[in-house]
Each structure stands twice: as structure tokens, then as C-alpha cells.
Amino acid sequence: MLCTVGPYSGGVPLKVLLLICLLAGYTLALHAEEPGANNIVSSSDIIASFPPDTQSVQEHSSGASALVGHLQGSGALVPATEPGGTEAGVTELWNGLKLEHDLPRPELFKTGPAPRLYSAIALIYDQETQQPLYTKNARERASIASITKLMTAMVILDARQPLDEEIGIEESDIDKIKRTPSRLAVGMTFTRSEMLSLALMASENRAASALARSYPGGKTAMVEAMNAKARDLGMERTRFLDPAGLSGGNVSTAQDLVKMVSAARKYTLIHQYTTATSNSVDGLGGRVMRFINTNPLVRNVGWEIGISKTGFINEAGRCLVMEAKIRERSVIIVLLNSWGRKTRIGDANRIKRWMESADTRSRTSRRG
């Protein structure tokens, strides 16, 4: 690995820059299996990849300890004996969901190293034992982007409006917050069922907006219903401001999202739409439009997924929630604010390999 520090004028001691180089090499080794990993890293590249509050390492001689602290918080320097490195708290029971990592883990996951995950927030929740297998910043409140659409779908389905009713795309459905593009042109009409499918599977923001607009009482009533359902589910640190997840003010925690995913899994249509690999609908002039699931893992035969939703806005980073069965064990996986475009998928695969290897170790031990 080549680490270049180059000339600098910020008053940073040489030992700080040397430490950055050392940590850069360590981080590269951990990310070696990430697609597109680069073997040439400069100190500016490493600093630029951190949130703004850690970039002060360029300005303060105490930046070395700040940098180490950030890497520990991100999981890059967490010892195997401290899964995720999150604080141990008082054991809590929220609506039947035990969500503190200081609860005992199932025996087969107590041996061997914990998975190295690069998402800033992560939670693996075992639905059978109602215990977390791994937590990392699970109490931290963060923007959740289009993960929001799971709540949108539940509230729409709870209203029991006709699924075959046609809804048109209007000017008011155009994203004026992030100005995201859409293949759904103003004037197109789809059934409520098709809108649900496009919002959940392809994360179409205009579809989510149209669904909310057609909700009894309109978007304002829709958002109120979403927050009310969150309270009913015991999602005490969750808030929704819009139905598509475009607002950075849509926030939650990994603990709360476990509850939302668990509730959404009970809706047959949400299971069906979030796990479909693709869907085709008729556009203007009868032209067939094909949409692809935003989660590539649903096309992987090695995964048995019960529910899935991705999300991304700048405030939230790349996010992924799933309910899946791994070695006959049903788990809910929450990954928020992942590094890079493909890291959330990489983290999900690392979780799967970790659980499979733990099960293999357990079987080998029993045979021995």
C-alpha cells in the first residue's frame, strides 16, 4: 500500500499524519473485499471520507485520538469480543422486543469473532429468541430515507381503500425537496396496488406521494397516521415528516426499525412487493415499463428474504432493512448510513456468512 502525506500547512504534527497512514492501511485491509477497493490512499482521502466533525483532525493536534474514536465508532477498530462497540445499557423490553446487546446471545454466536460491518448503525435481531445477535449504535437516531415507505405502505393498507382504484400522477407529486428523477410522468395513471408495488420495490417517490395524496384527508392526514402507527408500535424515537422519505427529518433508530419491519412482515402485499425482482406496468400509449427491485439480494438464490427495503438521501447515507431466514433462523437486519454505494449489500453478505459459519462451528463441535 502507498500512503502519501505530501506537504501540509495546517499545523498538524507529523505523528498525527503517520497515524493516519497507519490507520488507512488498516482500513484498506478491512475493506479489501469491497468492490472497487483502491490500493492508493492519501491522508486527505481518509479525512474526506469522515463526517465533517472528524475533519477537524486537520486543525487540531488532538486529531489522532478523534480519528481513532471515529474508527472505533464506525466498527473499523472494534475488537471481536465487543460486537459493534456500542454502550451496554439497561435491559429493556419494548413491546416484546428485547433490544439490548448486553442480553445473552444464543450459544452458537458466543464463539468466534463478531462480523466486521461498515455501516455506521447496525442491528441483527433474532426473532426466535427475541434477542439481538449484534448491535452497533442501535439507539442512535438517524435519517432513514426511503425505509419510510414501509410505514407508508402499512398505513395505506390499513385504510382499506380499493386496490384496483386508479390514481394519477400530478404536478404536486414531483419531488421538490431533493429533485429526484422519476419515470412516472405527470398524467400517467396506475392502480393503487401498482403504486404500492412501485413505491416499495422500485422506491418510486412519485408513487409514494400519489398514494399519500389519495389517502383520506390527504398528505397531512397521511403523515399524522404514520406517526400515530409508529407510536402504537412503540417506536418512541421515530418521526415522519413526509411519506416518501425525502425529508432528512424522517428519523428513527435501529431498535425502532426492528419493530417496523416486524410489523410490516405481517402484510402479505408488503412481503410480495418488497421481494419481487421486477414489475412491469403500462405507461403512456400502452408502452410497457419495467421496474427493478432496488435490493439486488432479492435476485440472489442464496438469500431467503421475507421483506426488504432500501433507502438513500445524503442525510441518511445508504440504508437497508430486511427480514430474512439464514440457516433456518429468522432475523431482522437493519443497516443505516453505510459507506459507499455497495457497502450495505456487502455488510448483509458478511452477516449471512457470519451466521452460517457460526452454525457450521456449532455442528462441528457437536460432532466432535
Image: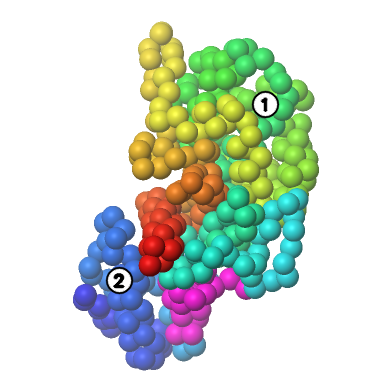
Secondary element at tag 2:
helix
Secondary element at tag 1:
helix
Which residue is disc 1 drawn over? 157
Q: If the image is split into quadrants, where does the C terminus sit? A: bottom left
Q: Position of residue 72 (x, y in %)?
A: 49, 75
Decide: is 276 above or below 345. Answer: above
Decide: is 156 above or below 126. Answer: above
Q: Position of residue 131 (x, y in %)?
A: 62, 58
Label 1, label 2: how many angstroms apart (C-alpha)? 46 Å
Residue 354 visible in the picture: no
Front in this rendered view, residue 1 or 330: 330
| Quadrant of res 176 | top right
The number of callouts visible is 2
Front in this rendered view, residue 135 or 53: 135
Give the residue drawn at x 32%, y 82%: 22
Residue 343's disc is none
**Residue type highlighted by circle 1:** Leu
For disc 2, the neighbor class at 10 Å (few under 14, some 14 to 19, many from 20) is few
Q: Which residues are magenta?
A: 64-87
In the orientation shown, which residue stands out farthest toward the top? Answer: 285
Decide: is 260 above or below 118. Answer: above
Residue 29's disc is 2
| Quadrant of res 192 | top right
Give the residue drawn at x 45%, y 74%: 80
Give the residue drawn at x 60%, y 50%: 128
Residue 65 visible in the picture: yes
Front in this rendered view, residue 34 or 102: 102
**Residue type highlighted by circle 2:** Ala
Q: Position of residue 337 (x, y in %)?
A: 50, 56
Q: If the image is split into quadrants, where does the N terminus sit? A: bottom left
